[in-house]
Image (cartoon, rainbow, N blue to C red):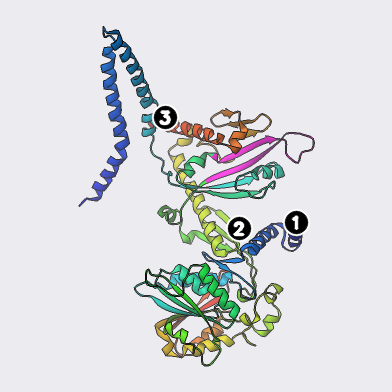
């Protein structure tokens, strides 16, 4: 019979396996390098040539271990790795042009129409980790479809990416007390019941301690609006919690990505120059079409993740 | 055409609500469904469209009672309309814990309720292979003095739970109803007699028949906005109710009478 300590230790051992493997292979590699380097001075030229090739290959493996495999293993695993994402889009400065840009979002099934604001659920493990750095203001510089004189306009879309908590996620329950929630249903229904058949389904939740309010009226059922409102509230509270934790760890001190306020301009899309620039890491890609319609966004996300991992490692080495 | 419709709606509702209404109308024309709790139900005139007040108390009722497959219950829903009350309970309670029977006087309601049962995947009988909640519907008038007389009902009697959202609108009130109700919904599903209370009198008569109910049975009745006290008193006067309470709906109206026998 295993005790709780045994279970915890077993879990720890299991988690260390990849690191153990990497270490074993590295040690093996080092041993081979030492053996091979001796053969580099062998009298036999064939032997020397083979050893030389072998040595180069082993060095390459060593470099890879040191530059990528180990660092990746040393970065603490993400606590939010399993979470899906809730993305909120709000068209901002630039009015109609901003809405038209947002209208190009893949979820829009009405062609050539604007979207003022939208909520998108992106489900799947790592969705949140992948998309969280999209939070911030995205700036668009282009000649709008509605512009007759060909002038370039600048408009903005604000994006907020929140962790999407599953309904049965136990952590959701720790985020708030029902007694702190004020639930309001919109509009009086008069006598209500059989007397009225138009649906007044809008719902508004207020979380009193933080003042966060969520209004929901997308669905035709009050019950469904209530569920979605609670889902958004949970996401916002979880986001607040994660950001507080980041601040406590002083992650944000030197980090231009984590430290960005959601009202900061994080990226500019310049259509005339086919250019996308991420201002936090100073990355510019000269293929706007690829970013907006193809896989180009992946490159930016990868670059940001790499930046985050590097910063995390620097922090680990930072001894206060 | 959609633009003109949108403009017309906007004039009465304002542009934001108009856009929503248009979206819902498109949905309604395409799939003619009405959400009810986590369910989607088919809606078709002249059958009464399920109301959010009803949705609210049925969900509350589902949390009040806890039938299990080891201790299942039988229920009877009077005036079932679309079948919303028993079907939502069939969905929310564990499989094999509920045997539901529903009656309605209208053949339109009956066929819609049966369609909804199929739409929601609730069978009329269990084939024994795995636990399921079941739903059956029969035509009957529960105003009639000899109710229940149909042999089909014998299968579910005696019951643990009686539910109803019976017609409760009085004659005077009926005259004042909006066109959206009067033009599309069956007056027989709404009109509760001069006082609006006719159906509750029939239900009270039923309560007096101890043979229809199991010990500790529960009755849950939706009422009109000013009827709660009257209906509660009516139930109490049968002498069969040991404890009763009134539930308020999300709009602050006293909407449901719960009586325990």
Indicate which disc, 2 or 3, sits on the residue closer to the N terminus. 2
Q: What element carries label 2?
A: loop
Chain letter of disc 2? A
The span shown in magenta is A134-161
Residue A314 shown in magenta: no
Question: Which is more toward the observer, B154 or A281?
Answer: B154
Report the residue marked by disc 3.
Answer: A314
Task: Answer few, some or many: residues within 10 Å of disc 1's Cα (few below 14, many 20 plus, some between 14 and 19).
Answer: few
Give the side of residue B158 with respect to residue A142, left or right.
left
Residue at the image point whose x is 26% and y is 9% from the top: A42
Residue at the far bottom: name it. Answer: B145
Residue at the image point whose x is 45% and y is 40% from the top: A246
Report the residue marked by disc 2.
Answer: A218
Residue A149 shown in magenta: yes
Report the residue marked by disc 1.
Answer: B3
The quarter of the rendered structure image containing the C terminus of chain A is top left
Q: Is mark 1 on a helix, strand or loop?
A: helix
Q: How far apart are marks 2 and 3 (CA)?
A: 45 Å
């Amino acid at each position: 019979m295993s005790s709780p300590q045994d279970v915890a230790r077993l879990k720890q051992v299991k988690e260390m396996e990849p690191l153990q493997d990497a270490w074993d292979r590295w040690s093996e590699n080092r041993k081979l390098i030492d053996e091979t380097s001796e053969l580099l001075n062998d009298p036999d030229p064939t032997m020397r040539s083979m050893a030389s090739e072998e040595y180069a290959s082993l060095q390459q493996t060593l470099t890879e271990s040191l530059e990528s495999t180990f660092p990746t293993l040393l970065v603490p695993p993400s606590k939010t790795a399993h979470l899906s994402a809730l993305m909120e889009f709000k068209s901002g400065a630039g009015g109609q042009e901003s809405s038209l840009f947002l209208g190009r979002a893949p979820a829009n099934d009405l062609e050539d129409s604007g979207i003022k604001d939208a909520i998108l659920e992106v489900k799947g493990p790592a969705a949140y980790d992948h998309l969280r750095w999209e939070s911030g203001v995205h700036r668009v510089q282009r000649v709008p479809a509605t512009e007759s004189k060909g002038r370039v306009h600048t408009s903005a879309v604000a994006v907020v990416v929140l962790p999407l908590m599953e309904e049965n996620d136990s952590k959701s329950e720790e985020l708030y007390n029902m007694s702190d929630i004020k639930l309001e249903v919109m509009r009086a229904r008069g006598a209500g019941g059989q007397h009225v058949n138009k649906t007044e389904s809008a719902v508004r939740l207020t979380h009193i301690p933080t003042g966060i309010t969520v209004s929901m009226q997308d669905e035709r059922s009050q019950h469904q609006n209530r569920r979605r409102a609670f889902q958004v509230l949970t996401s916002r509270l979880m986001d607040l919690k994660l950001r507080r934790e980041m601040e406590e760890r002083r992650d944000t001190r030197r980090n231009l990505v984590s430290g960005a306020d959601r009202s900061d301009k994080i990226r500019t899309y310049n259509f005339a120059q086919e250019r996308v620039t991420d201002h936090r890491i100073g990355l510019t890609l000269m293929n706007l079409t690829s970013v907006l319609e193809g896989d180009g966004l992946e490159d930016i996300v990868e670059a940001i993740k790499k930046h985050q991992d590097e910063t995390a490692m620097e922090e680990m080495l930072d001894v206060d | 055409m959609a633009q003109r419709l949108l403009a017309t709606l906007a004039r009465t509702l304002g542009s934001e609500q108009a856009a929503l209404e248009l979206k819902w109308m498109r949905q309604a024309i395409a799939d003619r469904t009405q959400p009810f709790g986590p369910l989607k139900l088919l809606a078709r005139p002249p059958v009464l469209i399920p109301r959010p007040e009803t949705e609210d108390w049925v969900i509350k009722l589902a949390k009040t009672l806890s039938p299990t497959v080891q201790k299942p219950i039988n229920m009877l829903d009077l005036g079932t309309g679309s079948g919303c009350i028993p079907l939502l309970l069939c969905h929310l309670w564990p499989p094999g814990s509920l045997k539901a029977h529903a009656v309605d006087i209208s053949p339109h309601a009956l066929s819609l309720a049966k369609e909804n049962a199929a739409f929601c995947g609730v069978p009329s009988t269990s084939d024994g292979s795995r636990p399921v909640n079941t739903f059956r519907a029969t035509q009957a008038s529960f105003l009639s003095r000899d109710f229940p007389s149909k042999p089909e009902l014998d299968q579910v009697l005696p019951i643990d739970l009686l539910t109803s959202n019976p017609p409760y609108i009085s004659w005077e009130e009926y005259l004042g109803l909006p066109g959206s109700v009067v033009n599309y919904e069956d007056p027989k599903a709404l009109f509760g007699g001069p006082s609006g209370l006719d159906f509750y009198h029939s239900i009270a008569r039923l309560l007096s028949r101890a043979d229809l109910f199991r010990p500790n049975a529960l009755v849950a009745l939706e009422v009109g906005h000013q009827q709660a006290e009257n209906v509660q008193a009516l139930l109490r006067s049968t002498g069969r109710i040991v404890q009763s309470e009134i539930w308020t709906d999300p709009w602050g109206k006293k909407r449901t009478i719960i009586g325990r026998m």
